[in-house]
Every structure is written in C-alpha cells, then in structure tokens.
C-alpha cells in the first residue's frame, strides 16, 4: 500500500512538473511575440487569420482589407472616439478597469445572463493578436496574462497604435485605414469627427452594419461618443 502511494505521488509530481514546464514554454512564446511586436508591425493576427479562413470557405481567392498606418497618421479624433467608446480610462489603468468589471458583474447578475463586458483596449488587443473567439475560463486567464505582458512591455501609444490597426471594422475589414475607405470612401486622415464616432460606435458589432448604415440606436451612440471625445485622454 505504502509503495503504491509513493508511486502515485511520484507520478503526480512528475505530471505537475511537466505541466509547469509546458505552461512556462507557452507563456514564453507569447512573451517573445509581444517583445517582437513592440518593435515590428504584425502583418496579420490570430483573429484576422480566423476571419480569412471563414471568408475562404466561400471564396478561395478572398483577401482581407488591411493597410498599416503609423500612429501619427491616425487622426486624433478617431483615437479619441475609440478611447471614449471602448475604454475611457485607457491612459490611466494598467490593463484592467476593475470598476467597470465590477459593474459588469453586477449587471450580468441582475439580468441572469452575460449582457455586459468590461474589456479594456489592452484586453481586446491581447485577444485579437493571439486568441480565438472561444469563451472559457482558460481563455480568459490567458487573455489576462497576455494583457499584463502588453502593458509591461509596451507604451500606451504602441498599444493603441496596434489596436487601431488590427481592430475589425467589417467583414474582412481590419484597421483604421481600411475602415475609413470601406465605410466612407476616404483615407483615414480625411475622416470627420462624426465619421470617427460612427466607426467607434460599431466596434462592438462591426459585422452588423453595412457601409455608413444608420439606425436610431447607432445615431444615439454616435452622439454620445462625440460628446465624450474632447474629454478622452489619448497617449
């Protein structure tokens, strides 16, 4: 009996050690990519590739609409609109908005289902760069770990630059430049403040809205974002 317990303990200890090493290797892989992307622009992300795979199930020649823009070339009112809409405390937090998370938890508990989220721009970037659309506690834990890596390695300016270049703004449309051309037929630098607010407003559900499409809800949302843009702090 004692011998069996010793063997079981050794097997358990070995299994834990192997798991710990594997986990460390996985996190090291993520961290190495974060270091690389701090200095180099990604040509694609995990989410972009997943979307392209779906498009190519219908059309084998499908391509994504995507063109990189340097931070300085992205209009300030688009940066302000996105921060005002998605993460008002972006400049001040360290990757997580704990107050917003608590409010989302309380709202979801009242409704009895998930109706609100509290993902920051950093968290959304972590998901877009590396992860699938799967919803699980393991994926959320990995998202949190990558968010910490992004915040520890990159400046807020770099995080926002990456986010605005890889965010989805339509079916196969990624990044501010492609979004401006797809929805309004103009380069990003020519966007008006109202157009920037419209692009920010559709970020949570970009596939729902056709080019420049307007609804009563969207109009209200655009007006709210425009009202908050001047107060939005950007890096």
Image (cartoon, grey):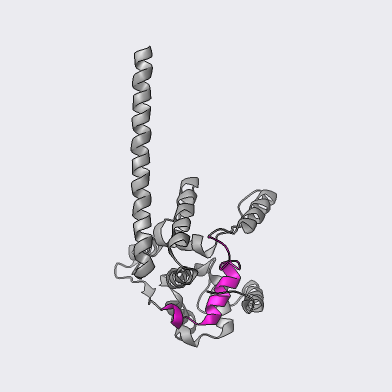
99 vs 181, left or right, is right
Rendering coords of residue 99 (x, y %): 64, 57
Rendered position, 219 above or below 208:
below
Identify the magenta region. 70-94
Identify which residue, 14 or 178, lies in the foreground. 14
On the image, which quarter does residue 39 sit in?
Answer: bottom left
Which of the 4 image quadrants contains residue 127? bottom left
The residue furthest top is 1
Q: In the image, is 119 to the left or to the right of 158?
A: right
Quadrant the N terminus occupies: top left
Q: Quick check: is 85 in the magenta stretch?
A: yes
Q: Is residue 225 above or below residue 11?
A: below
Coordinates of residue 73 in the picture (x, y in percent): 44, 83
Q: Is residue 198 visible?
A: no
> Quadrant location of residue 194?
bottom right
Q: Residue at x 43, y 72 (%)?
A: 165
User: Taking 80 as reference, is 95 above or below it?
Assistant: above
User: For the view shown, which residue lies furthest in the right direction?
Assistant: 110
Percent coordinates x, y for residue 106 in the rendering: 68, 51
Residue sitting nearer the eye, 185 or 66: 66
Q: Position of residue 132 (x, y in %)?
A: 42, 55
Is residue 15 visible in the rendered structure shown here? Answer: yes
124 or 113, which is in the foreground?
A: 124
The number of callouts visible is: 0
| 18 drawn magenta | no
């Amino acid at each position: 009996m004692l011998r069996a317990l010793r063997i079981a303990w050794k097997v358990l200890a070995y299994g834990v050690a192997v798991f710990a090493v594997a986990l460390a290797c996985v996190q090291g892989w993520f961290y190495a990519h974060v270091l690389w992307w701090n200095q180099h622009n990604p040509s694609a992300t995990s989410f972009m590739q997943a979307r392209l795979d779906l498009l190519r199930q219908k059309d084998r020649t499908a391509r994504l609409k995507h063109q990189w823009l340097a931070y300085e070339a992205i209009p300030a009112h688009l940066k302000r609109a996105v921060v005002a809409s998605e993460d008002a405390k972006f400049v001040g937090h360290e990757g997580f908005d704990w107050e917003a998370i608590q409010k989302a938890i309380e709202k979801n508990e009242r409704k009895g289902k998930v109706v609100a989220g509290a993902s920051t721009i950093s968290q959304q970037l972590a998901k877009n760069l590396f992860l699938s659309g799967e919803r699980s506690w393991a994926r959320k834990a990995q998202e949190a770990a990558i968010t910490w890596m992004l915040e520890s390695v990159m400046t807020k300016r770099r995080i926002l630059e990456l986010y605005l270049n890889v965010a989805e703004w339509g079916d196969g449309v990624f990044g501010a430049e492609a979004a401006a051309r797809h929805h309004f037929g103009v380069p990003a630098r020519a966007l008006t403040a109202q157009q920037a607010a419209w692009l920010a407003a559709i970020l949570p559900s970009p596939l729902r809205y056709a080019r420049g499409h307007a609804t009563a809800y969207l109009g209200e949302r655009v007006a709210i974002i425009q009202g908050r843009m001047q107060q939005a702090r950007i890096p």
